């Protein structure tokens, strides 16, 4: 835990004039991927602000086999992006991961989660504001719940942040995959201003700190 403050300070997202909801999205076709066998893979679901950012980060982690952007934690069935953006459906923008536990474990994924966003800002990451951008871990089993709560408690006790962590830790219920144009967003829309000025710098900082865990 001694180096945690340094790591956290290196990659917290700085303020920006751009927000996820304000960005004009290019209507791209979903990326064609080879069939993935989900046998022997585990699942994790995280919300840490705009799902474009979180997706781009976890796509770089060795052992993460598939990543999808979507919505969880709300009351409306099959919500659209437009509906979620109103902040009234109760959903959070989340990234769902399928990972190989032989290559990366849930605790390591939590380490990335805590360090790529500010978990002390309630319903906000940078200029992305609303309950849909809340910091949240939707756990899939008792082990994930225990690890998430333990990590959160230790981080609060360590004084890594000046303010208390507000990350929600809730049981996973259902994941609604977001519209096709949200999937693999950074790789398909890297020239968009939000990608250039928000996601790209965040990825560069992430790659410096987690270079030993990268796919490349």
Image (spheres, helix red, strand yellow):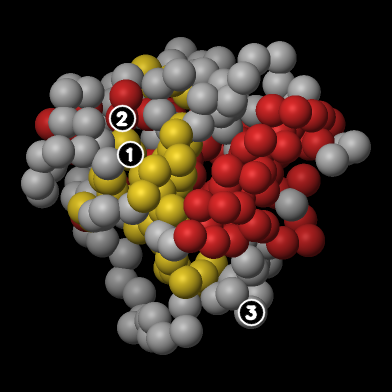
Q: Distance between the Cα atoms at labels 1 and 2?
A: 5 Å
Q: Quadrant of the C terminus?
A: bottom right
Element assignment for label 1: strand
User: Is residue 84 or residue 162 the one in the foreground?
Assistant: 162
N-terminal of the pair, mark 1 or mark 2, is 1
Say if residue 62 shows up in the picture.
no
Left or right, residue 81 beside residue 58: left
Q: Is residue 169 above or below residue 98?
A: above
Q: Residue at x 33, y 53 (%)?
A: 172
Q: Which residue is mark 1?
A: 93
Q: Distance between the Cα atoms at labels 3 and 2?
A: 32 Å
Asked whether the residues under the numbered discs 3 and 2 touch, taking CB atoms below 8 Å apart as contact, a structural biologist would say no
N-terminal of the pair, mark 3 or mark 2, is 3
Element assignment for label 3: loop
Q: Pointer 1: residues within 10 angstroms few (<14), some, or many (20+)? A: many
Asked whether the residues under the numbered discs 1 and 2 touch, taking CB atoms below 8 Å apart as contact, a structural biologist would say yes
Left or right, residue 193 beside residue 100: left
Q: Is residue 168 above or below residue 64?
A: above
Say if residue 99 shows up in the picture.
yes
Residue 114, horizontal then vertical, whole percent: 62, 39
Q: Which residue is mark 3?
A: 102
Q: Which residue is mark 2?
A: 132
Q: Residue at x 40, y 21 (%)?
A: 123
Residue 63, horizontal then vertical, whole percent: 59, 71
Left or right, residue 85 beside residue 123: left
């Amino acid at each position: 835990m001694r180096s945690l403050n340094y790591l956290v300070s290196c990659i917290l997202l700085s303020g920006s004039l751009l927000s996820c909801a304000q960005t004009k999205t290019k209507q791209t076709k979903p990326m064609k991927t080879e069939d993935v066998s989900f046998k022997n893979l585990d699942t994790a679901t995280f919300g840490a602000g705009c799902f474009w950012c979180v997706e781009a980060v976890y796509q770089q982690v060795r052992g993460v086999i598939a990543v999808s952007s979507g919505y969880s934690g709300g009351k409306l069935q099959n919500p659209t992006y437009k509906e979620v953006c109103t902040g009234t459906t109760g959903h959070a923008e989340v990234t769902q991961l399928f990972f190989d536990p032989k290559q990366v474990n849930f605790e390591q994924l939590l380490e990335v989660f805590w360090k790529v966003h500010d978990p002390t800002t309630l319903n906000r990451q940078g200029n992305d504001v609303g309950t849909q951008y809340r910091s949240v871990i939707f756990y899939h089993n008792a082990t994930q719940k225990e690890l998430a709560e333990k990590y959160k408690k230790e981080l609060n006790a360590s004084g890594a942040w000046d303010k208390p962590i507000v990350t929600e830790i809730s049981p996973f219920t259902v994941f609604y995959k977001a519209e096709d144009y949200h999937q693999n967003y950074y790789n398909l829309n890297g020239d968009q201003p939000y990608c250039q000025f928000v996601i790209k710098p965040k990825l560069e900082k992430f790659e410096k700190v987690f270079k030993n865990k990268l796919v490349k």
